[in-house]
């Protein structure tokens, strides 16, 4: 009767079947394949996680599930920024992007990632849209997207209201731009300050319609003089490869952009030139606006690289100064 292991003690054997019984040839192959598959899976998962950390960094804003106003160009920010900022977006950014015939990229996840850098200047403007295979550049070469203002179209009372709202809208919100109120004035200016405050409180109490955005919107539309007929822009498309896209996208994603607040280095002065960078990576949306140029070094370098790739002469150098 055969007993497993007897052959191990057989003097005429030169092989070691015990070892062979423990790891048969077929089983060795299976174990090796399992090990290789496991290692491949670990490497693949690590690569995917690394890619996700680059392509889909944390931060930004979730897309809204219920859209009520498709004309609001940074929709996920509703309820997360001041009412004045929301009104400026609805009014000013609406004029800007519609003048360039640009879609609203904030409403839903994009099929492929897109970055959009806009420059709003007093004398010219442009938009650079970056996707995986192309850069689309729209450059304004005549006219202004912003309508001219003619206050002679208002009644005397409306003109008074318009001047108040232009400086202080909304009257019941801390100004400017949601910062805490200024400290009390020095004693020699206290009386003047108190008189202004009383006048301000009286206006809100006796003219409640000044608190409603709809009334300000009515006045803005009434004073507007159409300039769209004179607004013109050119469009050019530059083909790029996926590696070029990944280079710029990586610079932006690693700059801390997705953690930045909506307004960065923004003083709130009237009629500034400013940049606005939007992103829709298919899972999150983000937008950051800054006056003049991105002073953050890493993000500034990323935007400079994008402007250079878009072949907009002279603008890339502005970020390096």
Image (cartoon, rainbow, N blue to C red):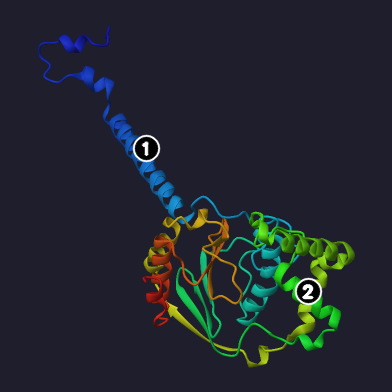
Element under disc 2: helix
Look at mark 1 in the image and give the residue it sits on: 38
> Looking at the figure, which quarter contains the C terminus?
bottom left
* Mark 2 / mark 1, whichever is N-terminal: 1
Residue furthest front in the image: 188
Please report the residue visible at 56 percent of the width from the left and 82 percent of the height from the top: 122
Mark in the foreground, 2 or 1:
2
Q: Residues within 10 Å of mark 2 (few under 14, many from 20)?
A: few
Task: Report, in whole angstroms, how far the alpha carbon at label 2 lies from the one at label 1.
Answer: 62 Å
Give the vertical position of 234 relative to 10 (above or below): below
Q: Quadrant of residue 142?
A: bottom right
Disc 1 is placed on an element classified as helix
Q: Is residue 172 left or right of residue 11?
A: right
Q: Which mark is on residue 217? A: 2
Left or right: 304, with 162 as reference point? left
**Quarter of the figure with the N terminus:** top left
Q: Are marks 2 and 1 in contact (CB under 8 Å)?
A: no
Can residue 171 be seen at all in this image of the molecule? no
Q: Position of residue 229 (x, y in %)?
A: 67, 92
From the viewer's side, name the closer residue of 35 and 158.
158
């Amino acid at each position: 009767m055969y007993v497993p292991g007897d052959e191990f003690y057989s003097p005429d054997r030169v092989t070691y079947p015990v070892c062979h019984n423990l790891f048969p040839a077929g089983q060795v192959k299976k174990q090796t394949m399992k090990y290789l598959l496991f290692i491949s899976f670990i490497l693949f998962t690590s690569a995917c996680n690394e890619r996700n950390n680059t392509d889909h960094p944390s931060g930004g804003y979730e897309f809204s599930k219920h859209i009520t106003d498709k004309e609001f160009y940074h929709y996920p920010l509703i309820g997360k920024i001041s009412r004045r900022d929301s009104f400026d977006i609805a009014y000013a950014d609406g004029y800007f992007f519609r003048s360039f015939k640009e879609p609203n990229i904030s409403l839903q996840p994009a099929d492929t990632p897109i970055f959009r850098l806009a420059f709003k200047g007093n004398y010219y403007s442009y938009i650079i849209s970056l996707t995986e295979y192309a850069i689309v550049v729209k450059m304004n070469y005549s006219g202004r997207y912003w309508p001219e203002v003619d206050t002679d179209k208002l009644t005397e009372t409306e003109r008074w209201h318009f001047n108040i709202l232009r400086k202080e809208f909304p009257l019941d919100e801390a100004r400017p731009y949601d910062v805490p109120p200024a400290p009390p004035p020095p004693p020699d200016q206290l009386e003047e300050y108190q008189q202004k405050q009383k006048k301000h409180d009286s206006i809100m109490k006796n003219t409640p319609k000044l608190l409603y955005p709809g009334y300000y919107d009515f006045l803005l539309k009434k004073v507007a003089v159409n300039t769209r007929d004179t607004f013109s822009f050119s469009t050019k498309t530059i083909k790029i490869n996926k590696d070029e896209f990944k280079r710029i996208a990586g610079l932006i994603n690693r700059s801390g952009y997705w953690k930045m607040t909506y307004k960065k280095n923004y003083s709130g002065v009237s009629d500034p030139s400013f940049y606005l960078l939007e992103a829709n990576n298919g899972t999150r949306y983000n937008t950051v606006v800054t006056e003049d140029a991105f002073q953050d070094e890493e993000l500034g370098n990323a935007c400079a690289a994008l402007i250079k790739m878009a072949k907009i002469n002279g603008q890339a150098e502005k970020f390096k100064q």
